[in-house]
Image: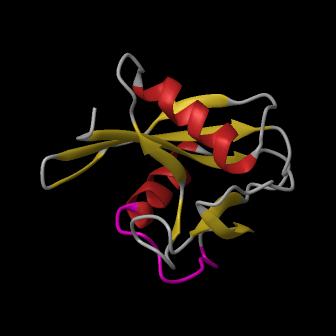
Amino acid sequence: MANQGAGVLPIAQNTGRMLLGLRSAKVHGPGEWAIFGGHMEPGQTPIQCAHVELVQETGYRGAIQFSHAPPYRRRGFTFYNYLGIIPYEFVPKLNWEHDDSMWCVPHELPTPLHEGVLELIRHSQRVVR
């Protein structure tokens, strides 16, 4: 499913902060802060893809509650977004797709942000209160 992907924005219940990753030079949008996600594999649902990508890219295997967010669409590509409510912040074990990560609040976001992330963060503020 080369024209579809999915990802998740982890949000820690104990702090209200969200986790973003700094994309490496080996992926699309290098040097941009983004959520964790990727292309969907044949037979995967968007939520399965988002969960697999979160585990692969951060090492997180704990409890998570997924909440649908508006998808991002551009040039025939659809990216399904999810908010991932988790109990606590964790220390990510990043793979090659990210050079760094940051727990942040909506009014203190790192730059540059990958396009589409700002709208997802605005949506998260309406959902997570």
Q: Residue at left 62%, top 63%?
A: 20
Q: Residue at left 83%, top 38%?
A: 87
Up/down of 112 relative to 27, above or below: below
Q: Is residue 113 magenta?
A: yes
Nearer to the camera, 31 or 109? 31
Q: Is residue 129 visible?
A: no
Residue farthest left in this picture: 75
For this view, does 3 lie left or right of residue 110?
left
Q: Is residue 54 magenta?
A: no
For this view, does 70 lie left or right of residue 117?
left
How far across and how far down the image is residue 108, in percent?
Answer: 64, 79
The boundaries of the magenta stretch are: 107-116
For this view, does 45 lie left or right of residue 52?
left
Q: Is residue 14 visible?
A: yes
Nearer to the camera, 127 or 20? 20
Q: Residue at left 51%, top 79%?
A: 31
How far across and how far down the image is residue 48, in percent?
Answer: 51, 24
Q: Residue at left 50%, top 68%?
A: 26
Q: Quadrant of residue 118?
A: bottom left
Residue farthest bottom in this picture: 111
How far across and how far down the image is residue 94, in percent?
Answer: 73, 57
Task: Give the main secondary structure of the magenta stretch.
Answer: loop
- Quadrant location of the N terminus in the rendered image: top left
How far across and how far down the image is residue 127, in percent?
Answer: 54, 43
Up/down of 108 relative to 127, above or below: below
For this view, does 4 lie left or right of residue 43?
left
Please count the marks in the image: 0
Figure colour scheme: secondary structure
Q: Quadrant of residue 83?
A: top right
